[in-house]
Image (cartoon, helix red, strand yellow):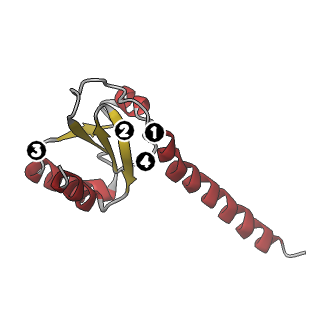
């Protein structure tokens, strides 16, 4: 039996399970109450979680900080407790809150387009 094929298959399965868990973990947040409970009725908030070691975060965090002032920017390396409250498992992650309920969670480097779209709808 060729064990290299079995090994590659096992590594591929672990890879899919790991990243699938991260991606599907965002669904746990949808419809839940904002862990911070600090937004007024009828208002919205955006939380952008980043890490200083994340390559994608290094390029988009300065743009978000400069152009999108209403976004709450959270560095998970310095505020790990808040990241745990929001169940953040990967960066960059953007959490959208409307009426104190989490309405959407987006993972990935195209966070700016999702932020722009969300703010444009408000």
CB-based contact (under 8 Å), mark 1 and mark 3? no
- Who is closer to the viewer here, 83 or 27? 27
Residue 118 percent coordinates (x, y): 23, 53
CB-based contact (under 8 Å), mark 4 and mark 3? no
Residue 61 percent coordinates (x, y): 21, 51
Q: Residue furthest right?
A: 1
Give me the C-alpha separation between circle 2 and circle 1. 7 Å
Residue located 30% across and 62% down the image: 110
Give me the C-alpha separation between circle 4 and circle 3. 23 Å
- For mark 1, what is the residue? 29
Residue located 34% across and 52% down the image: 54
Describe the element under mark 1 as helix, strand or loop: loop
Q: In this view, does 62 lie to the left or right of 101?
A: left
Q: Which sits earlier in the primary sequence, circle 1 or circle 4?
A: 1
Describe the element under mark 4 as helix, strand or loop: loop
- Who is closer to the viewer here, 18 or 29? 29
CB-based contact (under 8 Å), mark 2 and mark 1? yes
Describe the element under mark 3 as helix, strand or loop: loop
Q: In this view, does 111 lie to the left or right of 105?
A: left
């Amino acid at each position: 039996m060729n064990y290299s094929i079995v090994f590659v298959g096992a590594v591929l399965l672990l890879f899919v399970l790991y990243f699938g868990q991260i991606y599907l973990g965002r669904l746990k947040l949808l419809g839940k109450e904002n862990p911070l409970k600090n937004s007024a009725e009828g208002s919205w908030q955006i939380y952008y979680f980043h890490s200083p070691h994340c390559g994608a975060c290094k390029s988009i965090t300065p743009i978000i900080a400069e152009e999108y002032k209403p976004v709450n920017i959270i560095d998970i390396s310095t505020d790990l407790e808040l990241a745990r409250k929001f169940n953040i498992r990967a960066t960059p992650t953007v959490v959208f809150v409307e009426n104190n309920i989490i309405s959407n969670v987006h993972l990935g480097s195209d966070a700016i387009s999702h932020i722009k779209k969300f703010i444009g709808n408000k």
